[in-house]
Image (cartoon, rainbow, N blue to C red):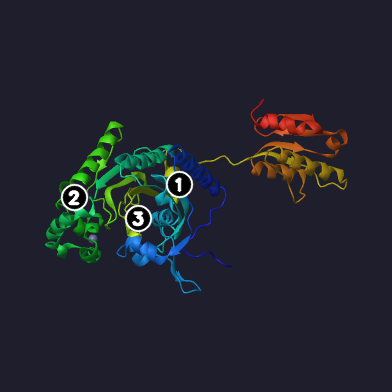
Amino acid sequence: MLRAPRGTNDILPPESHKWAYIEALLRRLSKIYNFEEIRTPMFEHTELFARAVGEATDIVRKEMYTFKDKGGRDLTLRPEGTAPVARAFLERGLAGGPLPRKLFYLGSMFRYEKPQAGRYREFVQYGVEILGSPSAYSDAEVILLGVRIAEELGLTGTTLYINTIGCPECRKAYREDFLKHVSDRAGELCQDCRERLEVNPLRILDCKNQGCREAVADVPLMQDHLCDDCRRHWAALQEILTSLGIEYAVDPTLVRGLDYYTKTVFELKWPPLGAQDTVIAGGRYDGLVEELGGKPCPGVGFAAGVERLILAAEKGERPLMPEVSIDCFVLFPDSEDRRIPEAGFKLLVDLRRAGISGDFDALGRSVKAQMKHADRLNARYVAILGEEEVRQGLVTIRSMEHGWQKQVPTGQVVDFLKEEVSGGSS
Ligand SMILES: [Zn+2]
Ligand SMILES: [Zn+2]
């Protein structure tokens, strides 16, 4: 038997109904916040991610699905969504159009990671980006959408963590201060962090290793090194959140390691998820578009793993239990008299044409077995066409919810069920 590749996931019914539900919810909220969908290719030139995500990151160093195609091009299955959106924004002329541009994406991403519960090598991310706005109101807008998603999923008790990482301008001075402080304690750092010291020192702040945590416990804070512009932005964001009564905590260890990530960083965490409790993570990337060869253009956004959103929702106050049912099961015996199956199948076709969801037993089983099948499909009504019914031009309708049974003239069945299904009588 052939098996699916390690780290991939088959989403089967009824699980797939949860996916459809959550995707519809994300699209509905995107619309309310006026984000429009963008769909970018599943693979890009490897260079895009090397530049936009950063050569020094774990994603680019260890986790990308990179390959050469038959033309010798270096390609990579997208490991994240922001870089492709920024690339398309530039390449397709959106950067020259009306700004800001508010886009969302929903699709598969690929990372060669160790598969764990709820973590796959192909996974689905939802994300939003606002390109072309330097305003702290745009930061607030994406944060509010993230908070709203958690609310609608029934996740109570989330905590919003925010931080500022300044801009390349103010970070230069800070980095020196930081390095001076941490270099003295380099011996306490883990192997990864000793490497980070060279390439990406601020990332030491978010290392989970105990020794590293202690080494940076009393480092100077970025907040105290901000330039005027960054300080104003940071104050404005907090004022907006406070004015709306949005609770937040400032977490100075929230960082992004690369120069084009600027100012705001945020995460929404939900403790019942345990060690991997971040449901939404985002921030500002005012230098990214320029890094990709465009004119300077500010941006802010977030991403959320849909697998984790589903996992969280299942543990939340509103577990995802979409009702899976059909409106009507059409039951007819597989009779020698062809008029019976013909009438039965025609009724099913007519019901479906009228927008009533329905099914039948294609295997020609006994009436008893068909009733069982109707039950399994969670049919709300069963329309029965036996020999007697067909002879009299009637159909027996049984309500599975209420237990009643009525005989309806064949020509009136579609209207009768339409009325019933839309919640007419009981
Ligand atoms: Zn600054
Ligand atoms: Zn470390």
Q: Position of residue 137 (x, y in %)?
A: 32, 39
Q: As rendered, which of 243 and 99 lies closer to the eye?
A: 99
For image coordinates 25% across by 65% down, the residue present is 192
Q: Position of residue 276 (x, y in %)?
A: 35, 51
Q: CA distance from mark 1 to mark 3?
A: 32 Å
- Identified by mark 2, the residue type is Met
For marks 1 and 2, the one nearer the N-term is 2
Q: Which mark is residue 289?
A: 3
Q: Nearer the viewer, mark 1 or mark 3?
A: 3
* Mark 2 Cα-neighbour bin, 10 Å: few <14, some 14–19, many ≥20: many
For image coordinates 42% across by 48% down, the residue present is 97
- Identified by mark 1, the residue type is Ile
**Which residue occupies the extreme top position in the image?**
425
- Which quarter of the image is occupied by the C terminus? top right
Relative height, residue 86 to residue 4 (above, below) = above
Q: CA distance from mark 3 to mark 2?
A: 24 Å
User: Disc 2 marks which residue?
Assistant: 222
Q: Position of residue 90 (x, y in %)?
A: 40, 55
Q: Nearer the viewer, mark 1 or mark 2?
A: 2
